[in-house]
Image (cartoon, rainbow, N blue to C red):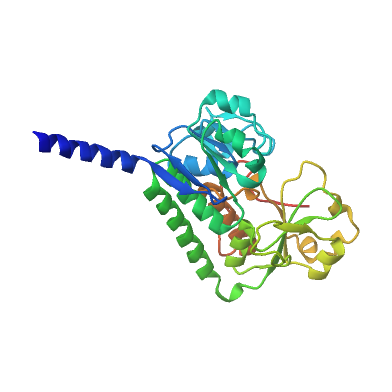
């Protein structure tokens, strides 16, 4: 009997050890949970995206452009409470929800990490590069007790990326620039920003180039005068969402850009700004493939208007 009880005790202890989970977040901080999270909060769209793909609905989310929550994630976030913007989340409301972990974009929340940590374990992610995306999905999978599913999501994405890149062959070499802001000088993204990395993998050349501060991830872009953009004259221009009219398109130089004259300027959705989740990154990849090689890759269909690819006139 004593041996049976001892064996049962050892089995119980082993189970408890297995039930606990830990990850090292992008601050380098080890985050330990006594058991997998079942009530995660997402102060980030990419984390809400990852949770949705893993089948673990978040209890809280943040705004997605002008929406209270990322509607593209469907029913998985319908019951989630909106905390406002990812840079100024409502922590009082977060506390009332009693989450068991909080998944956040590090650069927007690190200054309030201590306050969040007092509510539930805070996990900070960089969410800038493709490597960041793969790590975040893996970490989130570990935290919610679904590591194998997270591995599968990452593997399937990498296989899709490799397959699409392999179809391009000698067609590579077009140039591209990804622009955001409403000011006179557009903000352009460096090579290490996730959508640009995907463009590079698909054989496109980013005219903004590499960050002079790499491997430092910040800044991840710079303001490029129209004169400099015209000198680079990319084949393709991608415009990110802007709450205000884009002043740079009124610059007299705008109409001389090759992409403008060839009608290869495209409007993309908010998901391109925070696209590290499994759902968003796959959509970005497919949209990039179509706008660069429309004869090779079909345009993703049946998308909400705010996620669809549009020509900019």
Q: Residue at x 56, y 64 (%)?
A: 296
Q: Is residue 213 left or right of residue 60?
A: right
Counting from the top left corner in percent of width and height, residue 157 is at: 48, 56
Can you name the residue that lies furthest to the right here? 252
Q: Is residue 306 visible?
A: no
Up-down relation of residue 3 to residue 225 (above or below): above
- Quadrant housing the N terminus: top left
Q: Is residue 112 left or right of residue 37?
A: right
Q: Is residue 57 left or right of residue 127?
A: left
Quadrant for residue 45, please give it: top right
75, 155: nearer the viewer: 155
Q: Tally the marks.
A: 0
The front one of 145 and 116 is 116
Above or below, 194 relative to 66: below
Q: Is residue 32 visible?
A: yes
Question: Of all residues shown, which one is farthest toward the left?
Answer: 1
Q: Position of residue 261 (x, y in %)?
A: 80, 63
Q: Is residue 83 above or below residue 247?
A: above
Q: From this view, report whether residue 113 is shown above or below residue 79.
A: below
Q: Residue furthest bottom?
A: 170
Image position of 25 (left or right of 252): left
Q: Nearer the viewer, residue 114 or 122?
A: 114
Q: Residue at the far front: name it.
A: 2
Q: Residue at 60% across / 37% down in the picture?
A: 114
Which x, y percent locates residue 206?
69, 66
Can you give x and y, in whole percent of width and height, for residue 186 in the image? 80, 55
Residue shown at the point (56%, 32%) measured from the top left: 118
């Amino acid at each position: 009997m004593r041996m049976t009880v001892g064996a049962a005790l050892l089995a119980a202890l082993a189970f408890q050890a297995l039930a606990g989970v830990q990850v090292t977040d992008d601050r380098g901080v080890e985050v330990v949970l006594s058991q997998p999270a079942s009530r995660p909060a997402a102060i980030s769209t990419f984390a809400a995206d990852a949770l949705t793909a893993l089948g673990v609905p978040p209890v809280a989310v943040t705004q997605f452009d002008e929406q209270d929550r990322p509607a593209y994630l469907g029913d998985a976030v319908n019951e989630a409470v909106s905390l406002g913007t990812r840079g100024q989340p409502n922590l009082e409301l977060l506390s009332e929800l009693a989450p068991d972990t909080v998944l956040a974009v590090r650069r927007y929340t690190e200054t309030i990490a201590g306050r969040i940590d007092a509510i539930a374990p805070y996990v900070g992610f960089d969410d800038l590069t493709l490597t960041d995306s793969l790590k975040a999905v893996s970490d989130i999978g570990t935290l919610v007790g679904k590591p194998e599913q997270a591995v599968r999501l990452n593997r399937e994405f990498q296989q899709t990326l490799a397959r699409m890149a392999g179809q391009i062959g000698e067609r590579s070499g077009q140039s591209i620039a990804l622009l955001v802001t409403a000011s006179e000088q557009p903000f352009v993204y460096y090579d290490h920003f996730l959508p640009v990395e995907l463009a590079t993998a698909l054989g496109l050349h980013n005219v903004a180039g590499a960050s002079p501060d790499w491997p430092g991830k910040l800044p991840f872009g710079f303001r490029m005068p129209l004169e400099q953009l015209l000198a680079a004259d990319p084949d393709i221009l991608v415009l990110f969402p802007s709450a205000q009219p884009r002043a740079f398109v009124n610059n007299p130089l705008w109409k001389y850009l090759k992409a403008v004259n060839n009608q290869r300027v495209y409007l993309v959705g908010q998901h391109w700004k925070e696209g590290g989740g499994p759902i968003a990154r796959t959509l970005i990849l497919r949209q990039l493939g179509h706008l660069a090689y429309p004869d090779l890759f079909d345009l993703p269909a049946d998308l909400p208007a705010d996620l669809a690819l549009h020509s900019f006139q």
